[in-house]
């Protein structure tokens, strides 16, 4: 892939896993940024020791805020695209070339690593939350997205420059899809393998409250935010 790509890893209290994630990513992509979102442990130090650039929030602001900090860094430093993945080891660095191949083949501005083929292995409440969110967001964005909550994604710099993101939590990743769909950017889903399917023990996602928050954000992004 000829484009300059920055890997962005939002992290909160992930000292046990973030080092291995950074090291694995650096075997594929040279530029890795960890955004430490107000961790109370050694997340920032471990990430830096593993070879990542690190930007830290002094207090926890939410996954969306961490991603936006990473997006701003990427645009400021002239990257052509960013690839985001989680710090808990669920997302596998060996899957990254699939995103690059899809980007080169289709020119898509938002590529989502889809887990719909694995939903059956999730706990019922997480499976329901993922399916419900995906259907709402597919309707609001006029796309056929089947997994709207996957954090394993590639974003083009062109897309990031074109949209204004307002939300700060997990709902920001849903807002991106709606805004991209409304602006006719090409959105693509590709199936991915995972290190583990149901990341409840490592996730900060709250299925009920965050699903409600996502639904409200999607409504505002679809009908009120421009």
Image (cartoon, helix red, strand yellow):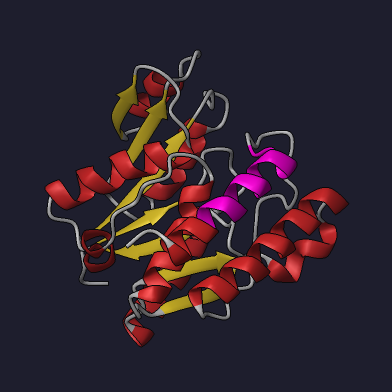
In this rendering, does residue 178 appear at all?
A: yes
Q: Is residue 103 above or below residue 148?
A: below
Q: Quadrant of residue 203?
A: top right
Quadrant of the image containing the N terminus: bottom left
Q: Which residue does the image show at 50% across and 67% down from the upper left?
A: 112
Q: Residue at x 36, y 33 (%)?
A: 35
Q: Is residue 157 above or below residue 168?
A: below
Magenta residues: mostly which secondary structure? helix
Q: Position of residue 98 (x, y in %)?
A: 47, 72
User: Relative to 36, is 118 on the left or the right?
Assistant: right
* Residue found farthest to the bottom: 105
Q: Can you give x and y, in whole percent of width and height, for residue 103 in the image? A: 36, 77
Q: Nearer the viewer, residue 209 or 151?
A: 209
- Which quadrant, please, contains the C terminus? bottom left
Q: Which residues are magenta?
A: 205-218
- Name the residue nearer the viewer: 96 or 141: 141
Is 108 covered by the magenta stretch?
A: no
Q: x, y percentage for residue 82?
A: 31, 57
**Who is closer to the viewer here, 48 or 65?**
65
Q: Is residue 132 left or right of residue 136?
A: right
Q: How many marks?
A: 0
Which residue is most to the right? 124
Q: Using the rendered image of the protein, determine whether residue 177 is visible from the camera's viewpoint.
A: no
Left or right of 225 in this view: 127: right
């Amino acid at each position: 892939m000829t484009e300059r790509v920055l890997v962005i890893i939002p992290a909160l209290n992930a000292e046990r896993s973030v080092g291995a994630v950074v090291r694995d990513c650096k075997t594929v992509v040279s530029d890795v940024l960890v955004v430490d979102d107000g961790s109370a442990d050694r997340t920032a130090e471990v990430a830096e020791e593993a070879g990542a650039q690190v930007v830290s929030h002094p207090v926890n602001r939410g996954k969306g805020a961490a991603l936006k900090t990473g997006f701003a860094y990427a645009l400021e430093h002239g990257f052509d695209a960013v690839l985001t993945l989680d710090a808990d080891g669920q997302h596998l660095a060996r899957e990254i070339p699939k995103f690059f191949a899809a980007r080169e083949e289709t020119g898509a501005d938002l590529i989502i690593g889809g887990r719909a083929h694995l939903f059956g292995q999730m706990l019922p409440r997480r499976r329901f939350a993922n399916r419900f969110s995906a259907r709402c967001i597919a309707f609001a964005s006029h796309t056929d997205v089947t997994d709207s909550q996957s954090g394993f994604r590639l974003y083009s710099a062109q897309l990031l420059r074109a949209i204004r993101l307002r939300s700060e939590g997990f709902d920001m990743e849903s807002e991106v899809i709606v805004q991209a769909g409304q602006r006719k950017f090409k959105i693509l889903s590709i199936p991915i393998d995972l290190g583990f399917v149901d990341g409840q023990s490592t996730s900060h996602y709250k299925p009920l409250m965050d699903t409600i928050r996502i639904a409200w954000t999607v409504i505002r992004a679809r009908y009120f935010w421009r």
